[in-house]
Amino acid sequence: MEFRDYEEFWPFYLTQHRKRATRRWHFVGTSFVFLFVIITIVTRNAWWLLGAPIAAYALAWFSHFFIEGNKPATFGHPLWSLRADFRMYRLMLAGRLGRELERLGISEE
């Protein structure tokens, strides 16, 4: 699909994450990103950074293929998907994702 900008992409991204389990797997994967960054800083070993995208994408893609039943949006829009993942993470952490889904008229499955 084609989008003019990120704000047009954002609702589509959320429609690709309708199932709570998919979003939870994404949350865990994104949490691993922060964990690997912290480990990198503490150990001063940049090799740990390799684990960040591996863990995040492995868990996210697992959720898309086996839970959500769709193709990850990152395949077509990698930078917007990364940005949207962090936005979704932030909203989940703040307990505001439900309101965002409601605001955009996106139903959960």
Image: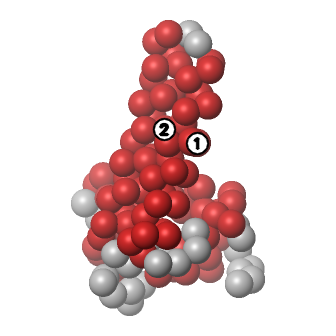
Q: Position of residue 27 (x, y in %)?
A: 37, 53
Figure disc tally: 2
- Does 3 appear above or below 53? below
Residue type at mark 1 is: Pro
> If the image is split into quadrants, where does the C terminus sit?
bottom left
* Left or right side of 84 for 107: left
| Residue 97 quadrant | bottom left
* CB within 8 Å, label 2 to label 1: yes
Q: What residue did someone put label 2 on? A: 33
- Residue 84, compared with residue 45, is above or below; it is below
What residue lies at 71% left-to-right and 70% top-to-bottom? Answer: 76
Q: Residue at x 29, y 75 (%)?
A: 99
16 and 57: which one is in front? 57
Circle 1 is placed at which residue position?
53
Badge 2 element: helix
Q: Please name the residue shown 51% across and 51% down the image.
A: 58
Considering only vertical position in the picture, is 56 above or below 38? below
